[in-house]
Structure formats: structure tokens, C-alpha cells
Image (spheres, rainbow, N blue to C red):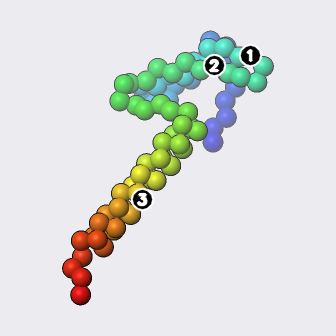
Amino acid sequence: MLILTRKKNETLRIGDDILVTIVDVQGDQVRLGITAPKDVSILRQELYEAVRASNTQAAQTVQNIDVLTLLKNAPKK
């Protein structure tokens, strides 16, 4: 992990296309402004984890339904 010290209105660059600017600092909160290409997804970590968990759960549900469907439609001996 790279740790940097920046002040209000200072910017850091990630690669050629992403700029992160310190917009405001109040107490223990920092407001960031991010400039990036539209094809770059920017999510808060907690939102990213929630979406990932939801997608994993949905995929497992689909797999479970598929197994149940196969069992229901299997020829009976």
C-alpha cells in the first residue's frame, strides 16, 4: 500500500487517466473528487463487497434451481 500525504485542493494521478483531488477535509472525513474515463468503475469498498456478495448469492440460487429442476425432470425408475 502506498501512503501519501495531501492537502486540500491537491491532486494525485493514477496512470494517465485518473485524477484524485482532495476536495475538503473536516475532522476525520475527507471528500475526494475523482476524474476518470467513463469505462472505469468507481465504487466504495463496502458497496463493491455488497454487490459481489449479492452476485454470488444469485449465482448459487440459479445453480440450486437448476439442480432442483433436473431432479424433478429426471426419469423415474
* Residue occupied by mark 3: 60
The tag earlier along the polypeptide, 1 or 3, is 1
The tag earlier along the polypeptide, 3 or 2, is 2
Where, by quadrant of the figure, is residue 60 drawn?
bottom left
Circle 2 SS class? strand
Q: Residue furthest top?
A: 9
* Residue occupied by mark 1: 26
Circle 1 SS class? strand
* Residue occupied by mark 2: 31
- Does residue 44 sit above or below 6 in this rendering? below
The amino acid type found where label 3 is placed reads: Gln
User: Are the residues flagged by discs 1 and 3 in contact, CB closer than 8 Å?
Assistant: no
Percent coordinates x, y for residue 44 in the rendering: 55, 33
- For the residues marked 1 and 3, what is the alpha-carbon distance in whole angstroms? 43 Å
Q: Residue at x 36, y 25 (%)?
A: 38
User: Are the residues flagged by discs 1 and 2 in contact, CB closer than 8 Å?
Assistant: yes
Is residue 76 rendered to the left or right of residue 53?
Answer: left
The mark closer to the camera, 3 or 2, is: 3
Residue 61 in view of the camera? yes
User: Are the residues flagged by discs 3 and 2 in contact, CB closer than 8 Å?
Assistant: no
Residue 11 in view of the camera? no
Label 3 crowd (10 A; few <14 / some 14-19 / many >=20): few
The amino acid type found where label 1 is placed reads: Gln
The mark closer to the camera, 1 or 3, is: 3
- For the residues marked 3 and 2, what is the alpha-carbon distance in whole angstroms? 37 Å
Figure quadrant of the N terminus: top right
The tag earlier along the polypeptide, 1 or 2, is 1
Q: Residue at x 29, y 66 (%)?
A: 69
